[in-house]
Image (cartoon, helix red, strand yellow):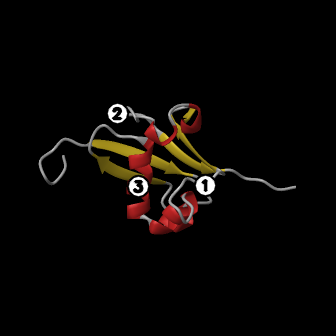
Amino acid sequence: MRQDGGASLKVVVRLASALRPHAGGAPAVDLDLPPPVTVGAVIDALAAAHPAVGRRLRDEAGAMRRHVNVFVGADNARDLDDLRTVVPEGADVAVLPAVSGG
C-alpha cells in the first residue's frame, strides 16, 4: 500500500550487471507504483531511486537511449507499446543495455 492509502503494485526490476554498480550493487530494485503500471512509470521510478541508473537509461532530453532494452516477461517493450507498455502484476521487468564491440 502507498502511504496515501491508495493501492500500489510491487514491481521488481532486474538490472543487468553493467547497471548494478550504479544501484549500489543491487541485482534488482523493488518499486511500489500506483496502477496502471507502465514501462515509462517503472523507468521514472527507477531513475528517481537511482539517478546514476537513470542517466544510463535516458539521454539529456529524457528519451530512452537506443541501446537500452526493457523486457516485460519475455517481451521487449519496444516490440509492444514501448514506454506505454502495461506491466501486469507479477511480471518480471528486466533492464538490459545492449553490448557491442568487435
Which residue has dot 1 on it?
Answer: 65
Q: Position of residue 14 (x, y in %)?
A: 50, 48
Mark 2 element type = loop
Question: Is 49 drawn above or below residue 42 in the view shown?
Answer: below
Q: Amino acid at mark 2?
A: Glu
For the question of whether residue 25 can be seen, the reply is no
Camera-near label (2 vs 1) is 1
Which residue is found at the position 62% from the left and 60% from the top?
18
Q: Quadrant of residue 21?
A: bottom right
Question: Is 48 drawn above or below residue 8 in the view shown?
Answer: below
Tell me: 5 left or right of 86. Answer: left
**Which of the two discs, 2 and 1, labels the residue nearer the N terminus?**
1
Which residue has dot 3 on it?
Answer: 44
Where the C terminus falls, by quadrant? bottom right
Q: Nearer the viewer, residue 46 or 24?
A: 46
Question: Is 4 drawn above or below residue 8 in the view shown?
Answer: below
Which residue is found at the position 37% from the left and 34% from the top?
90
For the question of whether residue 1 can be seen, the reply is yes
Which residue has dot 2 on it?
Answer: 89
Q: Position of residue 58 (x, y in %)?
A: 54, 59
Which residue is found at the position 34% from the left and 51% from the top?
31
- Label 2 to label 1: alpha-carbon separation: 26 Å
Q: Position of residue 66 (x, y in %)?
A: 65, 51
- Label 1 to label 3: alpha-carbon separation: 14 Å
Callout count: 3
Which residue is found at the position 15% from the left and 44% from the top?
6
Mark 1 element type = loop
Q: Residues within 10 Å of mark 1 (few under 14, many from 20)?
A: some
Mark 3 element type = helix
Q: Amino acid at mark 3?
A: Asp
**Which of the two discs, 3 and 2, labels the residue nearer the N terminus?**
3
